[in-house]
Image (tube, rainbow, N blue to C red):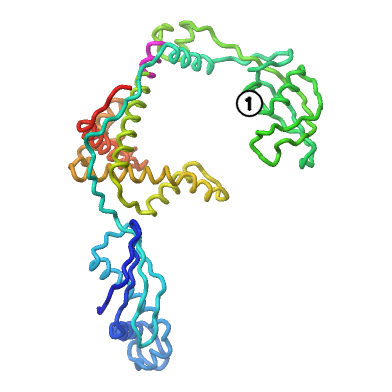
Amino acid sequence: MELEVTDRKSSGAERRLRVSVSAATVNDARERAAGRVAKQVRIPGFRPGKAPANIVRKQYADAIRQEALDALMREAYLRVIESEKLDPVTQPHAHEVTYTDGEALTFELHCEVRPDVQLARVEGFKVKRTSAVVTDEMLNAQIEQLRDEKAAWTPLEDKPKEGDLVTVQLAVTGGDVPSADSKEYRLVLGAGQIIAAIEELVMELAPGGSAERPVKWPDDFPDEAQRGKTKTVRVALTDVKRKSLPDLDDALARELGDFETIEALRAAVRTDLETQATRESDSGVRGKLIDDILTANSFDVPPSWVRQVVGAYAQAYQVPEADAEKFAAEFMPMAERQVRRDMVIDTIALKEKLIATEKDVDDKIAELATTRGLKVGELYASLQKAGRLKEIERSITEERVFEWLLARNTVEAE
């Protein structure tokens, strides 16, 4: 193939190349395409493959032309990628294709290539570690949360107050609300679930009571179109329930788990909090270290990789199609940082031979199986079915990379 590449343009990880395939090569490709088409088609009065070439070319001109173009483009893609030493991360695609009889085939080839990440500096950084201390206040707050989860709701006939769970029938008219159809809501008063003025109205009622009055929507209401509007609100209070917390005693400890005493529960909760605090502290150190490395080393990022991360999170968060563009714009910087982070880890893992092997994954699964009291084969099959083997491989690799980095950088207490 006689081919020429001109007008090379680079923008980050994107490449644009003007490609020209000689007229002679194009003509040869059409002759070969005509031969292939002639063997495939049936023309009345002739045996398969025996029809005169001029008749085949006339009746199947478009098919021959397209067949030749497809073959030329496939070969040209391969030749350009090889000759230009490109490592594409997206499927190359052609723009501005010019394909005229008797002339050269020309087009502009677009693709994204794998960046050559050169990490000039990954050592000598100093990062601060956030304290992982668990205070008594933190422990008490967690115990209170567990206690709250076991709370009972007792029906009352009194007027409700903050913290009570109420069931109300609520109707709103006025402004741009055309209907007064009431809807039922279950609300915890004081939790910011409804406008404060409506809560005040509810707290004036006893179960079975109702009231109606104008209410002005606050100036900081989330829906800007409703801010400052006055509407008539009708409320009917169906029932009131008040939270009753269990005693903080050994009986609660036994109800919450395999704990004989409240002190055993507190010790277990403190251990869990300390483990979580250490994990968060470690994560903070790793994040700061990656940020320092990213600041010290610049490299290109394929836009398609960033878009893939955005798309994955949009799907995970079930972002509506109408909000997809806004979500992408807001999430793009975070997605790009994640891609850069992964590129740093991949580069170090490859250079320092830290990538997890199949045996490493097997050993990790065996360890997990022992911890969970499962059979290794069953756990492996379950993880494989769930598509989580790559996740385990990645976690092992990342752990090794950060161990390597932490040995070469300084971590100081705040």
Q: In the rendered image, is residue 367 in sight? A: yes
Q: Is residue 144 left or right of residue 357?
A: right
Q: In the rendered image, is residue 39 in sight? A: no
Based on the picture, tell me whether residue 270 belongs to the magenta stretch.
yes
Q: Quadrant of residue 113?
A: bottom left
Residue 181 x/y as whole percent = 78, 36
Name the dominant secondary structure of the magenta segment.
helix
Based on the picture, tell me whether residue 89 belongs to the magenta stretch.
no
Q: Is residue 170 left or right of residue 93?
A: right
Residue drawn at x 69%, y 42% as measured from the top left: 225
Residue drawn at x 20%, y 40% as measured from the top left: 354
Q: Quadrant of residue 202?
A: top right
Residue 76 x/y as whole percent = 29, 73
**Label total for image:** 1
Residue 58 x/y as whole percent = 41, 91
Q: Nearer the viewer, residue 160 or 413?
A: 413
Label 1 neighbour load within 10 Å: few <14, some 14-19, many 20+: few
Q: Nearer the viewer, residue 281 or 150?
A: 281
Q: Is residue 254 left or right of residue 193?
A: left
Identity, as a three-letter code, of the amino acid under mark 1: Gly
- In this view, 114 is above or below 178: below
Q: Which quadrant is the C terminus positioned in?
A: top left
Q: Which segment is the magenta one? A: 266-273
Residue drawn at x 39%, y 54% as measured from the top left: 303
Q: Quadrant of residue 285?
A: top left
Q: Which quadrant is the N terminus positioned in?
A: bottom left
Residue drawn at x 45%, y 10% as measured from the top left: 253
Q: Is residue 366 left or right of residue 162?
A: left
Label 1 element class: loop
